[in-house]
Amino acid sequence: MTDKSAPRRRGRPRGASDSRARIIAAAVDEFGEQGYDGSTIRSIAARAGVDSALVHHYFGTKADLFAEAVGVPMRPDLDVPGILAGPREDVGERLVRYILGEWEKPEVRRRGVLLLRATVSSKLTTPLFAGFLTRELLSRVTAAMDAPDAELRAGLVASQIGGLLLARYVMKVPPLVDATVDDIAAQVGPTLQRYLFG
């Protein structure tokens, strides 16, 4: 005979792996249909048939869930604010060094190349990834600048980095593939520095 009044044990919810998988599937569908900005934790939870608190429990923020759902290989939204908060005179170089340093890791590079190819070739993926970058990365870069054209400058930073990643890791342009991270950071860093604070 069981005691129905006994307190429930704490720990992972029952059916945790099933709930987590349903949330990820719902997130993929919701992000695909509504875009990054149009999707909310609440709408994803409703689609998955769970409470929004459970989505937060497993994934934290919308950016965390997006990264998990689409396989974002690195989290600039978490790391770049610290780079921007450091000494201003070499932010551009540190930014290049950080991004390329991450992409030199085989798993980051593998997933990053897949995501870049999908972003360039898919009408669905392009606005989705652009929304994530705009909200979670470029807005932080813009906030770090004291300039009336900060949004344009942040966009130029993104274009420089995006072009560099495409040329080095997707197109594999020989001089860029052969160059070291330090060499590229020394050449590209000052350009980003000018975009950011020039």
Image (cartoon, rainbow, N blue to C red):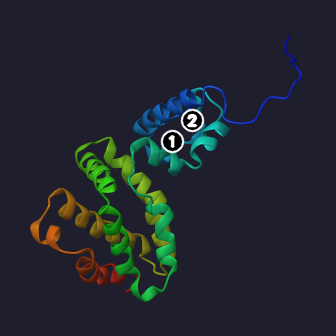
Q: Amino acid at mark 2?
A: Ser
Q: 193 left or right of 83?
A: left
Q: CA distance from mark 2 to mark 1?
A: 7 Å
Q: Position of residue 130 (x, y in %)?
A: 37, 54
Residue carrying label 1:
39
Q: Position of residue 193 (x, y in %)?
A: 36, 82
Judging depth in this view, the residue of 6 and 153 nearest the camera is: 6
Judging depth in this view, the residue of 3 and 109 nearest the camera is: 3
Residue carrying label 2:
43
Q: Position of residue 139 (x, y in %)?
A: 48, 65
Q: Is residue 129 visible to us here? A: yes
Q: Residue furthest top?
A: 1
Occupied quadrant, residue 166? bottom left
Q: Secondary structure at mark 2?
A: helix
Q: Which mark is residue 80?
A: none
Q: Quadrant of the C terminus?
A: bottom left
Q: Position of residue 97 (x, y in %)?
A: 34, 74
Q: 178 left or right of 135?
A: left
Q: 168 left or right of 36?
A: left
Contact (CB < 8 A) between labels 2 and 1?
yes
**Residue at the spot x=60%, y=39% of the render?**
55
